[in-house]
Amino acid sequence: MNIKKHIPNLLTCCNLTCGCFGIVFCLEGRETPAAYFVWAAAGFDFLDGFAARMLKVSSPIGKELDSLADMVSFGLLPSVVMYTMISASTVDVWLPFIGFLIAICAALRLATFNVDETQTDSFKGLNTPANTLFITSLPLISWAGNWLQTDWMLIAITIVFSWLMVSPIRFFAFKFKNFGWKDNKVRFTFLAISVLLLALLQINAIPVIILLYIVSSLVEVALGFDKN
């Protein structure tokens, strides 16, 4: 029995488990543990692909399992988080269900990724982990004030970020062909600023870093760095 071929799938299942736990904590009104499980899920999501490439055990089943796990951790979970936040900010019974637009667009994003062979060095549309990190960090940040927790702002965030996931906009991926400055100037600059923001703002830096990622990707496309 070849154990190593099952290691990536085990890591993917850890991603899925973290997503399930995060949903439970969110439904119980404990946003901080839910966010921690999202971070863990994102870590496992990175490691499963890394392990598959390093061990050279990539498989069609692994690819499909990864998308199914991502749908829970980075599709359903952020929708539940947004649903609970909108519920806490409005007396309208139906308005919070707009939060599940995130799950719908995440499903479309993941399905498109599975059949689109052009997304090797970059993503078409905002990737679901980045979207989820932004959404789940919103209840935890302290610098934004009460205006961020208003129903109209949360609905606006839901619509904009849902659209970004299914948009044709190109976002850079952290798949380095080499480590030269010329081909990775945007990536290296983004990473350096992100580390600085984390050191200064700690948990409050997460939504800022995701916004920086979006802006950096737009700059890369606008200046043609993505064609280097």
Image (spheres, rainbow, N blue to C red):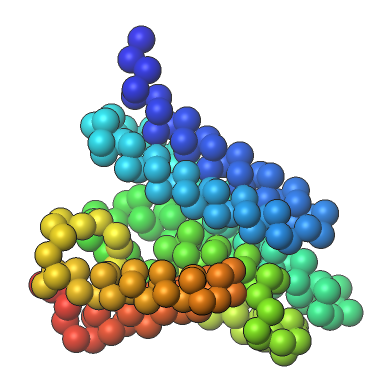
Residue 102 on image: x %, y %: 59, 66
Residue at 30% across / 62% down in the picture?
173
Residue 133, image x, y percentages = 54, 64
Is residue 23 something one can see in this rendering? yes
Q: Position of residue 42 (x, y in %)?
A: 49, 52
Q: Residue at x 25, y 36 (%)?
A: 54
Residue 207 seen by the camera? no
Q: Residue at x 60, y 80 (%)?
A: 157
Side of 2 relative to 131 (left or right): left
Residue, far top: 1
Q: Is residue 135 above or below residue 49?
A: below
In the picture shown, does residue 11 fall above or below 104?
Answer: above
Between 212 and 90, the residue placed more toward the observer is 212
- Residue that sits furthest to the front in the current view: 199
The front one of 110 and 198 is 198
Q: Above or below — where is 203 with respect to 33?
A: below
Q: In this view of the protein, which residue sits in the foreground, 187 or 76? A: 187
